[in-house]
Amino acid sequence: MNLQELVQTRKLLVCVGSGGVGKTTTAASLALAGALAGRRTLVLTIDPARRLANSLGLQEFGNTEVRIELGPEVKGELWAMMLDAPSTLRDVIRKVAKDDAQRDAVYNNRIFKAISGSFSGSQEYMATERLYDVHISGRYDLIVLDTPPVKNALDFLESPGRLVKFLDRQIMKWFLTPLEEDRVFGKRLWLGTAAVVYRLLGHIFGKEFLGELSVFFTLFRDFYEGFRERHEAVGKIFTSDATRFLVVAAPTDPSVEVARFFLQELAQRSCPTAGVIMNQVHRCSNNPPDVEALLGSSARALDPVQAPSVLARVGAAHRRLRELANLDQQRVEELRRAAGSRLWMKVIPRISGEVHDLAGLRGLHHYLIEDSVHSV
């Protein structure tokens, strides 16, 4: 199934890969392709280049879906949202809280205020939480998720369960034991090793801090099931037949290494993977450059003394470009072998200039969609 068929038939496309490989631009171009195909499409992006963000109407963070005008001739719709990590966790709390009082109690807890910044900084987790919300809303025919750049390829794949692990029942039980003195088992545990550790923490941080920590876990105890259900739902979304993962890479050793690892992990986790998109690939003809074609009338006007120097520089530049193209092709073939015969691979040539507007996205659309490659 090629990219044209993917944007026409699938519900979710997830672009994964290392940073700096054109992942955000690729995601935006795929979303544009979905809109051009007549679908209501959302691209959920994390940290796009400022000029691209401005061209998409994303002047500021805010978890707000913004429609990008494409003209009356386009039957579909293109929407974009730039993730605002600090507010996402608060939105999740609001959704899983039983009532406003419980929500406000969590918001006002000093421990929550202290750790919310840390969790909000986990863009991988916040991306999956926001994905869950827009996916179940049913507002879009196609969602294209631009995953955040990761230092560890597993960070994104493991992020849906991060908060569930943090709120593990055993952890909550340990901190809640002092507040449950009416339970015989709790009394006995409190008289053992846990009491020693707890008193030590109280000596270091103060009893008030430990009291607030226990209150924090008391509040979150009721949220556990809600977080677990969201975690399981995201896991099902990732393995659904309506979802396809796209591994985006560039012809560099670190990027290829991350892409290979993603391919392995996605296969082990039964996440449906469509193929690999290799961006920024140098291309060069093996034939010597036609200087007259390159320089036009300036070539004929060259001073006889200067001509050999100019020709030498043009020849050296061509040889260097050919070397880069050969190295890129080696990395393309390496990743093609890693992808295997069941996945297609799309090679996108290096495009001069920065893709920072809709015109640039349409240009990339030509290579991604119109020049589409079928599965092999």
Image (spheres, rainbow, N blue to C red):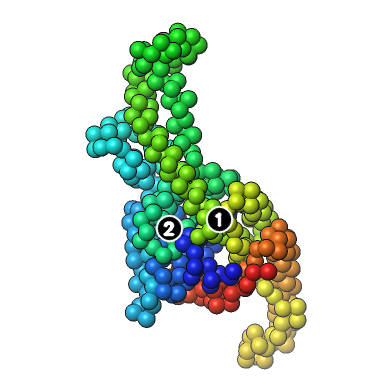
On residue 308, the disc is none
The N terminus, quarter of image: bottom right
Callout 1: 10 Å neighbours few (<14), some, many (20+)?
A: many
Report the residue at 46% width, 43% height from top. Answer: 231
Tell me the kind of residue under disc 1. Val
Q: Earlier in the sequence, mark 2 or mark 1?
A: 1
Q: Nearer the viewer, residue 302 or 135?
A: 135
Q: Nearer the viewer, residue 358 or 306?
A: 358
Report the residue at 41% width, 65% height from top. Answer: 141
The C terminus, quarter of image: bottom right
Q: Position of residue 72 (x, y in %)?
A: 34, 79
Q: Which residue is mark 1?
A: 16
On residue 44, the disc is 2
Q: Is 320 rendered above or below residue 309? A: above
Q: Position of residue 48 (x, y in %)?
A: 45, 59
Q: Position of residue 202 (x, y in %)?
A: 40, 15
